Image: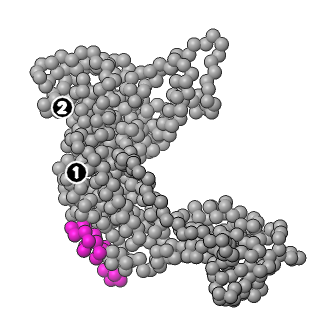
Amino acid sequence: MADDVTRNEVEWAPHQDAKIWFWDKSTFADVRIIDELQMVQLLDMYKAEMHCIFDNEEEYVGVNDEYIYIPIPTTNPPATPHAPDFDDNDEHVAAEGGITFEAEIELGAKFPDIISFKKAIRHFAVQNGFEFADLKTDKTRFIAKCVANGCPWRIHASRLFDNRTIEIKRLPTGHNCATTKLKEGKMASQGWCADRLLDWGASEAKDKLEGDYGIKLKYSKAWSDLKQAVEQVHGKYDETFQLLFNWKAQIDISCPGSVVQIDVTKKTKRFRRIFVALKPCIDGFLAGCRPYLGVDATNLHGQYTGRLVAATGVDGHNWLFNVAFAMFDSETEDNWKWFMGQLRMAIGAPTGLVICTDACKGLETAVGAVFPEAEYRECMRHLYGNFMKYYTGGVFTEHLYPAARSYTEGLFNWHMKKIYECFDYLDTSHNRIWYRCAFSEESKCDYLTNNVSESFNSQIKKLKGLLLHELVDGIREMIMEKRYLRKKIGRLMHDGILPNVIKELNTISKNLRVVKVSRSDDDIAEVTLIDQWNNTRRHSVDLQNRKCSCREWQLTGKPCKHALA
């Protein structure tokens, strides 16, 4: 019903009294809808949250939300000085040094040089859906006409006395001839496409150009044009591998202690793979992050059609923390073992290390071989995708997912007994750790999903089409800027507890439904609360040792609601 609501009001039928209750996550309580405004707000909330069954607030990973902690400047920045305006005859000359193909094509329009003019007239032809043929063109003049039979359109532009500026001297006022619509666009040259493809992949570029300009392009043309666009800005593909070694040498000088390994083939000395773990990332992970790593791979969009893999953690604020990344041609057991071996060389084997992954081919064997002491978790999103291929209905949402979220073995077993028919499948196909009651208490991270890796993949989306040396340096620059921003935020903080943790604990404390607190010592008590299903639950709390029988405190490192009570 909520998904179909598109209006801003709710109408009740005559003499009808609707009673609606829902669980409000912000107040941790059951709330009854008492008026139309509340109903509208509930429906808006439902539609905003319905995209995923998983609790994203619970496993939130911050990527670009640091701005909320940066003070707003109290004074406006100084205005950029502008050159004085001059009333002369150059108002139609396109800005020199900029992209000029968007300039107006009109009688008397001027362009800084013949190249700028040719770009502009080609763009004009693509936009207006016609094709022209050059009659005479050189460094001093350009004469062309429409290729359609009987069309009188003709353009003539020539150089002025400064021997550089090009001015349109002849141009008919109207031109309604369409010669290229719904056909492969011949006027959309490689250079024209390249100017517009720098931030896109080939498929996205093809669709975008066809949609914006009403032309038809072959995929191969879009790909070659995209390659040219990248080369215009970042250099040629063949040069990128040598530039990787130059980049490594510079990192060794400017950031000593970093682990940068470039692997080449033995005979031909051709590039195979690269691993990068910057010294600040290594030190920050070991000194200030929980021992939790999400590992995943994503496709690269450039001419090097390999895989970018990353090991990513979370800091105390649940913000994304980049630890290491690598690139290789494909997901094989050998490549994954090499990556894991380099990762171990960089960070060692921290106590309580947790590694969470999706179903990456060869990765399970590599983790077991290189990090046998690590707790190996499976992403619940991946399990969900496979599980629903074999079991439908409410099996997952009513029992398997609640079982995974259960902190205690008793509650886990209660849910699992309801779906005993799934035991064999889970033991065979998903035999890694995916449920909280089996999590160790050392990592203080109760994530069921590999959100950290997905967040990293989203963060570098615009970099994945670059040449390899530009890609690794782009990630390095992103990490550097992110660390500086968080350093600024850290300097503003004086309390021992981070703001997001304080906010979360305050919210829970204000909405506790406490029935009884029975003390046996100053720091030990039995706490009885009413849960979201209006059932009373009793747990024992030890404040001195930071423990609760619900196990949430031990697994997350944050006081649970029983401890707060």
Quadrant in the picture for residue 28: top left
| Residue tagged 1 | 288
Displayed quadrant of residue 184: bottom right
Which element is circle 2 on?
strand
Amino acid type of the residue that numbered disc 1 sits on in the rendered structure: Gly
Within 10 Å of disc 2 (Cα), the crowding (few <14, some 14-19, many 20+) is many
Residue at the left extreme of this rendering: 521
In the image, what residue occupies the spot 62% across and 71% down?
A: 86
Whether residue 164 is visible to the viewer of this picture, yes or no, is yes
Quarter placement of the N terminus: top right
**Which quadrant: the C terminus?**
top left
Q: Position of residue 35 (x, y in %)?
A: 54, 19
In the foreground, 170 or 64? 170
Q: Nearer the viewer, mark 2 or mark 1?
A: 1
Q: Residue at x 61, y 24 (%)?
A: 10
What label sits on residue 343 in the rendered view? none
Residue 44: horizontal and vertical position, in percent?
53, 32
252 magenta-colored: yes
Q: Nearer the viewer, residue 49 or 263?
A: 49
What amino acid is found at the position of numbered circle 2 in the picture? Lys
Give the spatial CA distance, label 2 vs label 1.
Answer: 22 Å
Residue wearing tag 2: 547
Q: Is residue 285 above or below residue 242?
A: above
Q: Nearer the viewer, residue 32 or 50?
A: 32
Above or below, 176 relative to 379? below
Q: Which residues are magenta?
A: 248-269
Sooner in the amino-acid sequence: mark 2 or mark 1: 1
